[in-house]
Image (cartoon, helix red, strand yellow):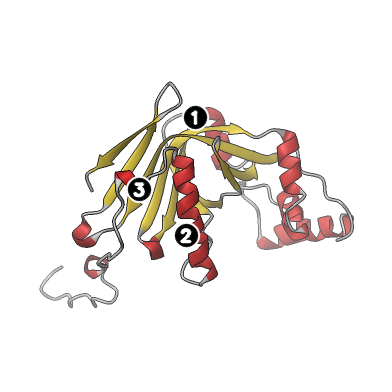
């Protein structure tokens, strides 16, 4: 900033933005043995926060991929299932993230539960879900979302919004509300098998708690504390 430039308004100055986290700590003795059990505990608390209006979409997660050349990209998607085998989301298999995963199945996930001063950071490997599993989930989607999966050639360039709206309207005429919509062959799920799962709890003075599970070859998990 030169002498002639006014001082930035602290309300809009990112360097002045800071929040002192007052949350309780996270300790090794309080963790579940398996990271997915620990995730289930935190996810339940995140859902309860969402019910009370303090957190929006607790199942939203940032998915980070990289193509064969190592160029990264990230986007927010909705996690639709989790169990001991990992985390599941659904997408168009022609999308950028799906193309990345076809070339490089290594993936990162981030659950940004900011109102709770928490994050869950996952690294793992992606594989496609089976068609039966995909079709079963697709049938649970709202009718409009089913049509949207057909109407959108995700990540491709289109001429205008009107092109997308026209495709959706044509599909709506073909498959009215009482008509069963088949799952598109180019659409399905990915299951992320975790290799590391880090639970991040914000603490005062930026001395956050970071506890990371790392998978061992025998199926057990090692827990380590990371410096913030």
- Give the structural element (helix, strand or loop) at label 2: helix
Q: Going 54% across and 68% down the picture, which residue do you hit?
A: 51
Neighbor class of circle 2 (other Cα within 10 Å; few <14, some 14-19, many 20+) is: some
Q: Which residue in the protein does label 2 denote?
A: 45
Q: Is residue 154 left or right of residue 132?
A: left
**Which quadrant of the figure has residue 128?**
top right
Question: Which mark sits nearer the N-terminus, 2 or 3?
Answer: 3
Of marks 1 and 2, which one's residue comes earlier in the chain?
2
The residue under label 1 is: 104
Secondary structure under tag 3 reads: helix
Could you say where residue 110 lies in the image, as x and y percent from the top left?
43, 48
**Labels 2 & 3 near each other (Cβ < 8 A):** no
Total label count?
Answer: 3
Q: Nearer the viewer, mark 3 or mark 1?
A: 3
Report how far apart the C-alphas of labels 2 and 3 lie in the structure. Answer: 15 Å
| Residue located 51% across and 30% down the image | 105
Eye-nearest disc, 2 or 3: 3
Image vertical order of residue 148 relative to residue 184, above or below:
below
For marks 1 and 2, give the CA distance: 33 Å
The percent position of residue 120, horizontal first and vertical second, equals 41, 49
Vertical relation: 68 (above or below) 83:
above
Q: Depth check: 7 or 182 in front?
A: 182
Residue 62 seen in the current view:
no
Q: Position of residue 221 (x, y in %)?
A: 39, 31
Among the two numbered marks 3 and 1 on one chain, the one whose residue lies closer to the N terminus: 3
Label 3: which residue? 30
Question: In the visual, does 44 lie left or right of 121?
Answer: right
């Amino acid at each position: 900033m030169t002498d002639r430039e006014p001082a930035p308004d602290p309300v809009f100055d990112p360097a002045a933005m800071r929040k002192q986290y007052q949350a309780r700590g996270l300790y090794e003795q309080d963790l579940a043995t398996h990271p997915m059990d620990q995730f289930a505990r935190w996810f339940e608390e995140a859902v309860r926060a969402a019910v009370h209006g303090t957190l929006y979409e607790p199942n939203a997660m940032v998915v980070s991929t990289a193509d064969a050349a190592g160029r990264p990209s990230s986007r927010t998607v909705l996690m639709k299932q989790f169990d001991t085998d990992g985390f599941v989301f659904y997408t168009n298999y022609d999308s950028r993230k799906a193309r990345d995963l076809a070339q490089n199945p290594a993936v990162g996930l981030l659950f940004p539960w900011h109102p709770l001063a928490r994050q869950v950071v996952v690294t793992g490997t992606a594989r496609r879900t089976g068609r039966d599993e995909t079709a079963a989930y697709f049938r649970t989607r709202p009718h409009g979302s089913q049509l949207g999966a057909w109407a959108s050639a995700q990540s491709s360039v289109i001429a205008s919004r009107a092109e997308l709206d026209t495709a959706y309207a044509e599909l709506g005429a073909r498959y009215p509300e009482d008509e069963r919509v088949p799952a598109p062959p180019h659409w399905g799920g990915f299951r992320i098998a975790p290799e590391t799962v880090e639970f991040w709890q914000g603490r005062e003075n930026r001395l956050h708690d970071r506890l990371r599970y790392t998978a061992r070859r025998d199926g057990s998990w090692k827990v380590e504390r990371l410096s913030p």
